[in-house]
Amino acid sequence: MSRGLPAERVTVLIAARNERATLPALVTRLRECLPGPPEILVVDDASTDGTADAASRVGARVLSLPRHQGKGGALRQGFAAAAGDFVLTLDADGQDAPEDLVRLLERAREGADLVIGSRFLGRFEPGAISRLNHLGTLFFNRLVGVLYGVAVTDSQAGVRCFRRDLLERMVLQATEYEIETEMLLEAIRLSARIAEVPVRRMPRSAGSSSFSRVRHGLRILSVILRKRLP
């Protein structure tokens, strides 16, 4: 950064629904490992367990949605509200290592428009992913490569870093877990510079996922096929 220019701002965006048990430690670790300090923006997707209060108490900025909008809807609201020149995303469930975001941010500052935190380049700890979800992600990775001509190792990764100008050009409509796929395909459409770096994925320490293999898998497949059709 040249002397006299303002420092680039960083936002960490977390979409959360009923994740009170994991958020305080997650926010604390983010503040400790990222420079800035970063803006930590938690979008509370109409939680019923005090998620918003738990995040607010440890210093996060909280955007509370009055009704459940799904992960995609929550992230889209967060993108519109985020102040950062770089916007990082990670899941609220504690399965991602906040320290890995430093590597994504460095790669974005080197020139990438979208940096994906690839669990397949990194590692899955025992119990971090089911065999069916593992195989499903590999299938979607391959399908994106065949249909769009772009090889990625983790098309469903929730850990990502975006440049603000790329986010502002994306047309996002997804409301649920297909949001990761839609963001990737929008980046491809816009000829963005896409990079991947290795990250870790741990098993859940609390709560349970609302991801449905059949319903959400079909939604992901639909996005991949629909955006490829003229």
Image: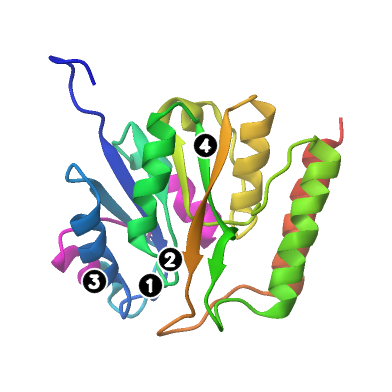
On the rendered structure, is 23 left or right of 112? left
State the CA–CA distance, disc 1 to disc 4.
29 Å
**Residue type at mark 2?**
Asp
Q: Amino acid at mark 4?
A: Leu
| Cβ atoms at labels 2 and 4 below 8 Å apart | no
Where is 94 relative to 170, above or below? below
Give the image quarter of residue 126.
Answer: bottom right
User: Residue 47, labelled with which disc?
Assistant: 1
**Which residue in the protein does label 3 denote?**
24
Q: Earlier in the sequence, mark 1 or mark 3?
A: 3
The residue that mark 2 highlights is: 96
| Labels 2 and 3: the sequence-earlier one | 3
Q: Which callout, 1 or 3, points to the residue nearer the camera?
A: 3
Q: CA distance from mark 3 to mark 4?
A: 27 Å
Q: Residues within 10 Å of mark 1 (few under 14, many from 20)?
A: some
- Residue visible at 16% across and 65% down? 58
Where does the magenta region start and end?
53-77
Q: Position of residue 156 (x, y in %)?
A: 63, 56
Q: Nearer the viewer, mark 3 or mark 4?
A: 4
Instruction: Answer with left or right where residue 124 lies relative to residue 106.
Output: right
Q: Secondary structure at mark 4?
A: strand
For this rendering, which residue is in front, 162 or 1?
Answer: 1
For disc 4, the marked residue is 114
Q: Is residue 61 magenta?
A: yes
User: Does the image show residue 121?
Assistant: yes
Q: Which residue is at a point 43% across and 57% down the rendered structure image?
A: 90
